[in-house]
């Protein structure tokens, strides 16, 4: 039931719990994670977690954005280059991700599909795979950063930024 010692996150990472239940800690705040949920790790945060909350081991998938991503300003530059996007476009996405109230991601059907597309095309075998991978990564980050809106039409700052980016 124990897990690895807390570690400093150096790369933007999206985790998805495929099987089981666990508790992950981000910057000393504990979060209960259940099967099908994801978790967003931003550079500079401190992360640790239990191996399982049940008798069965957990299964975790991970998407790690490569490059020396140590701080948000370097994160923007690295993602801009990796995803072939303009710096301003990536800044909108990163700002939205950093403003999320919780690192826990409740994947919906589209989020699951985007996550699977990233895993299927990584590493890319050819130019078309690379294009699919970049497209899926951008869409996944926007999906995570946008969060659900409420019924009365009020949107968070991160939702407005993502909508602005898409228009």
Image (tube, rainbow, N blue to C red):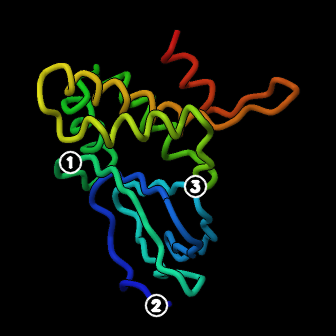
Quick one: SS at disc 1? Answer: loop
Crowd tier of the residue under label 1, counting other residues whose Cα lies within 10 Å: few below 14, some 14–19, many 20 or above: few
Instruction: Name the residue located 73 percent from the left edge and 29 percent from the top edge.
Output: 155
Where residue 43 appears, x then y in whole percent? 34, 56
Q: Nearer the viewer, mark 3 or mark 1?
A: 3
Crowd tier of the residue under label 2, counting other residues whose Cα lies within 10 Å: few below 14, some 14–19, many 20 or above: few
Q: Earlier in the sequence, mark 3 or mark 1?
A: 3
In the picture, measured across the screen, residue 121 lies left or right of residue 52, that is left
85 or 135: nearer the viewer: 135
Where, by quadrant of the figure, is residue 59 drawn? bottom left
Cα separation, mark 2 vs mark 1, equals 28 Å
Where residue 67 appears, x then y in whole percent? 17, 48
Quick one: SS at disc 2? Answer: loop
- Please identify the residue farthest to the top as the structure is shown: 167
Where residue 143 appears, x then y in whole percent? 53, 33
Cα separation, mark 2 vs mark 3, equals 21 Å
Q: Which residue is mark 3?
A: 36
Labels 2 & 1 near each other (Cβ < 8 A): no
112 or 66: nearer the viewer: 112
In the picture, measured across the screen, residue 52 lies left or right of residue 153, that is left
Instruction: Name the residue located 20 percent from the left edge and 27 percent from the top edge.
Output: 130
Where residue 71 appears, x then y in whole percent? 30, 52
Identify the mark at residue 134; answer none if there is no mark.
Answer: none
53 or 72: nearer the viewer: 53
Does 156 sit above or below residue 29? Answer: above
Labels 2 & 3 near each other (Cβ < 8 A): no
Quick one: SS at disc 3? Answer: loop
Identify the mark at residue 66; answer none if there is no mark.
Answer: 1
Instruction: Name the residue located 60 percent from the left edge and 75 percent from the top edge.
Output: 30
């Amino acid at each position: 039931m124990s897990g690895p010692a807390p570690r400093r996150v150096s790369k933007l990472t999206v985790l998805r719990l495929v099987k089981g239940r666990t508790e992950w800690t981000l910057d000393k705040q504990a979060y209960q994670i259940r099967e099908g949920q994801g978790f967003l790790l931003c550079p500079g945060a401190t992360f640790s977690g239990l191996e399982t909350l049940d008798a069965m081991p957990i299964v975790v998938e991970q998407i790690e954005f490569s490059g020396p991503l140590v701080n948000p300003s370097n994160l923007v530059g690295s993602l801009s280059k990796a995803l072939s996007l303009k710096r301003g476009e990536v800044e909108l996405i990163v700002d939205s991700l950093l403003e999320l109230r919780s690192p826990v991601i409740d994947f919906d059907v589209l989020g699951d599909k985007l996550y699977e597309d990233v895993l299927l095309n990584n590493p890319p075998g050819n130019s078309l795979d690379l294009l699919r991978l970049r497209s899926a990564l951008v869409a996944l980050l926007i999906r995570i950063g946008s969060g659900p809106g409420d019924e009365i039409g009020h949107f968070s700052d991160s939702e407005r930024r993502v909508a602005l980016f898409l228009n």
